[in-house]
Amino acid sequence: MRRAFDIGKELDGDFIVETDTGLRWHRERFRVLYADTDKAGVVYHANYLKYFEIGRAGLIRASGRSYKEIEALGLFHPIVDLRVQYESYADYDDELAVYARPSEIAPVKFGYSYVVRHDGDARVVAHGYTVHCCIDTAHKVLPVDEVTQAIFKDFGVTR
């Protein structure tokens, strides 16, 4: 359970430091699309995985790299494990932010942590993680690529 996520300090760009932990996160803001809601008018649960991807892709871009750069090396990062914990809800057209940061890295896998919240009232909507491995075009598992290692090192996350 994570009911609070307090921003202590805003850094350059969309990087922030969390008050409680001192950890650096990347923030990506967006609005909930009508297509993301269910018949009850709230965000459909599976769309939070898309929001995690928005956060992860934004973090990679803000770190001066891109996932396309990794794919150009013939490498891919499929998700091998994930968790989403729901704390509240979001409606159509709500302004949300997804906060993402690298959380762990090992020889052939790595993970990201996420928090989705309403920035207006600081209400946490969902949080969780994804774990990825590194594979080539033949789906052979490989050591984590240098681009990803560099991003994780920028956040102080090393093997």
Image: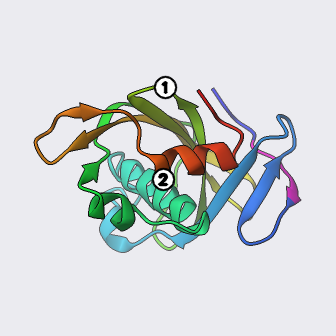
Q: Mainly helix, strand or loop, the magenta region? A: strand
Q: What is the three-letter code of the residue carrying label 1?
A: Ala
Q: Residue sitting at 20 percent across and 44 percent down?
A: 136
Residue tagged 1:
106
Count neighbours of disc 1 (C-alpha within 10 A) and say few if under 14, some if 14 to 19, many if 20 or more: few
Q: Quadrant of residue 12?
A: bottom right
Residue 152, compared with residue 44, is above or below; it is above
134 or 122: nearer the viewer: 134
Q: Position of residue 42 (x, y in %)?
A: 42, 57
Q: Which residues are magenta?
A: 5-9
Q: Position of residue 74 (x, y in %)?
A: 23, 55
Mark 1 or mark 2, which has the lower sequence index?
1
In the rendered image, residue 159 lying in the magenta stretch gets the answer: no
In the rendered image, residue 7 lying in the magenta stretch gets the answer: yes
Q: Judge from the rendering whether residue 131 lies leftward or rightward of residue 99; answer left or right.
A: left
| Distance from Cα at disc 1 to Cα at disc 2 | 14 Å
